[in-house]
Image (spheres, rainbow, N blue to C red):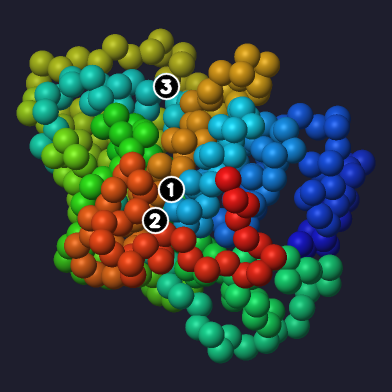
Amino acid sequence: CDFKRCETAAAKRKADWNLYNDYRRILDRKDIDGVIIATTDHARALPSIHACQAGKDVYAEKPLTLNIAEGKVLLKVARNTKRVFQVGTQQRSMEMNQIACRLVRTGGLGKIKLVQGVEYPSAALLPANTPEDPLPEGMNWDVWLGQTALRPYNQQAHRGWMGWANFSGGEMTNWGAHGLDQIQWALGMDATGPVELWPMESSTNAAYANWPGGGNFGSIGFRYANGVRVHLNLPAPTDLMGGGRFIGEKGQIDIWRNNFKIDAPGVTLELPPQEEIDKWHDKRALWQAQYHMKNWLDCIPTRERPHADVEIGHRTASLCHLANITRRLQRKLTWDPEAELFVGDAEANRLVDPERRKGWELPKV
């Protein structure tokens, strides 16, 4: 969409790249087996679906979708086409997270009484009357807008897209895609979701005062069918961004990116060798997501499912969307995680599958 950035990136690296202004030309190539999709949130689902249909294996950034309906279709397409599909929640490949989440999931803390997560802010709706700014050279604004409503070019929308609900779920789907993923994983809920959600007390946060729209706050509670409750009420930002606090009968454990802190007398964890711990915490180390990327690449020849398979990514993104919908409607909601619809609530269900601009519809599956 922003072709000037393609040219600048290639020139900076003195790279002999093939540059395209239509991703479908890449999918047409028979010499490409896999693709990495790192678009804005609102533009990720359709290229992911089209890549699967073209027979490519996929590594897609998180959050996987802009809304729940996209994830439902994408999951079906990925399964029907038998693609190896990794979602970029790289904490799934970090050993310390694997150890800590396994402890909770296998009952190491006893029955879980409560889980606390971060009160990640949601994005705000972009005002309809945003001013028209000069269009950057090489920018295809119509394509950049994708499924969203057609509007004149606006720099605040373009450069600040994560703060606007038209294009993103805000920090709830950004850091929340990591944090709620850890909660789902540790609780053994990778293939399901909560059955009930409700708004809790409202709050504000000065750390997000300069966000587009100012950030949309309010603690959220939800409950799984087994009775476990989660409260997203820890202030943001915090050390637990991308993690959670699990309070059980035998004590509690805080889990965050490749680290944990346990306070449970008598509960022991078998740690990896020190060199493995040092590898993850070495500030001089190479890009940490390389190990998650390697897991995807290793699964391509074996056709095994990677650590953050498409269903995991869909269910995590759905939980983020559910929290945003609850905050937006400000009332208790009942969710059917099997049908992936709200029970008896037409208004809420319209937010599960929002209207898309003509020409950007999801395929029928």
Left or right: 62, with 224 as reference point: right
Q: Residues within 10 Å of mark 2 (few under 14, many from 20)?
A: many
Residue, x 41% and y 65% (percent of image)?
351
* Mark 1 touches mark 2? (CB < 8 Å): yes
Residue, x 86% and y 30% (percent of image)?
31
Distance from disc 1 to disc 2, alpha carbons, whole Å, reads 6 Å
Residue at disc 2, secondary structure: helix
Quarter holding the N terminus is bottom right
Task: Give the quadrant of residue 233.
Answer: bottom left
Q: Which mark is residue 95?
A: 3
Residue 129 versus residue 260 in the image, above or below: below
Q: Earlier in the sequence, mark 3 or mark 1?
A: 3
Query: Picture coordinates of residue 246 (x, y %)?
Result: 20, 36
Task: Give the quadrant of residue 149.
Answer: bottom right
Residue 307 versus residue 238 in the image, above or below: above
Residue, x 84% and y 47% (percent of image)?
25
Distance from disc 2 to disc 3, alpha carbons, whole Å, reads 28 Å
Residue at disc 3, secondary structure: helix
Dot 2 amino acid type: His
Say which of 181 and 77 sits in front: 77
Q: Which residue is mark 1?
A: 317
Left or right: 236, with 174 as reference point: left
The answer, for residue 290, to whether it is visible in the render is no
Report the mark closest to the observer, 3 or 1.
1
